[in-house]
Image (cartoon, helix red, strand yellow):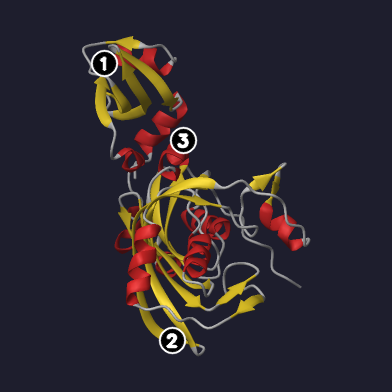
Amino acid sequence: MNAPRTRVQRRPVHGLLLLDKPLGVSSNNALQKAKFLLRAEKAGHTGTLDPLASGVLPLCFGAATKFSQIHLDADKVYEAVALMGQTTTTGDAEGEILSDRDATFDAQDLARVALAFTGEVQQVPPMHSALKKDGKALYEYAREGIEVERQARSVTIRSLALQEVPAQKGRRCVRMWVECSKGTYIRTLAEDIGAALGCGAHLIALRRTRSGPFMASDCVSLEQLESMDEGQRHAQLRAVDALLHDHHSISLTPHESGRFLSGLRRRGDWADCNQVAVYGQEPHSLLGTAHVKAGELIPTRLLSPLEIKSLLENPA
């Protein structure tokens, strides 16, 4: 007879956890595991990372979930390896081989292609992606053997370096270092580079090494979290406003704080600014985000009084 499951007593947890997601684990499963280990009431992530990819996955807890969209828009940096000469149905090693040909490029070809794919490029999202059409993820259509029309989207490759590395499975391989805007599919980039070289390619390794300002060296692994006691796990959390690192700060008096939290615009001697983190002075606490236009502080995203109280009682 199975022993009864122990019910986890959830608690208010607020902050940002920088997780080094392992291979073979979905972003949601990694989130749920971290949420369980921290006994957190509320959690969310800042955009998915493929199960076949590892690396930086910022996780938001409690009040931090209010600002997860901000980080979703951040630039990312990836290190990947493409196997040249073969294309697959999924653009990675999980798919069935579609084409197989010789790869005859040289270092000059790699330099030429890297330059061609730097800057604003058009990408057609892969069928094996979480992008939705008519409320259904593309990968669900793909599993049913259905291919739907996708519109090309503009993304920005801020920097791209390509270098041949030792062969795998008897095939030439190219390592890719990519700094890119949100919404960039590295699998698609690898396929497009293979097509430009005239041989085709698919991805065999992918790691996110930076997300916004957060580096892989800043992260903790699930294994490390599991080995820690509760206090040590909590110590891994960064403050909620770590997500607002590039925001200008404005502090309000208690009277003005209350009016701001009710959604009212405040007028003051402030320069125009698109990204503002707003704090209360007494006690010092994050109230939300705003923007300033023509001397008006206009609320964008507000914490509730209950969230602020909990944040003060349970700081990261």
- Left or right: where does residue 270 sit relative to residue 276? left
Distance between the Cα atoms at labels 2 and 3?
45 Å
Residue 163 placement: quadrant: bottom left
Residue ID at (42%, 24%):
300
User: Which disc, if any, is residue 253?
Assistant: 1
Residue 127 versus residue 19: which sits nearer the camera? 127
- Left or right: where does residue 205 sit relative to residue 176? right
Residue 131 visible here: yes
User: Which disc, if any, is residue 5?
Assistant: none
Give whichever of discs 2 and 3 has the lower sequence position. 3
User: Which disc, if any, is residue 167?
Assistant: 2
Give whichever of discs 3 and 1 has the lower sequence position. 3
The kind of secondary structure element at disc 3 is: helix
Residue 27 coordinates in the image, percent (x, y): 54, 58
Are discs 2 and 3 less than 8 Å apart at CB?
no
- The N terminus lies in quadrant: bottom right
Amino acid of disc 2:
Ala
Residue 25 placement: quadrant: bottom right
Amino acid of disc 3:
Lys
Residue 210 placement: quadrant: bottom left
Residue 209 versus residue 108: which sits nearer the camera? 108
Image height of 8 relative to 107, above or below: above
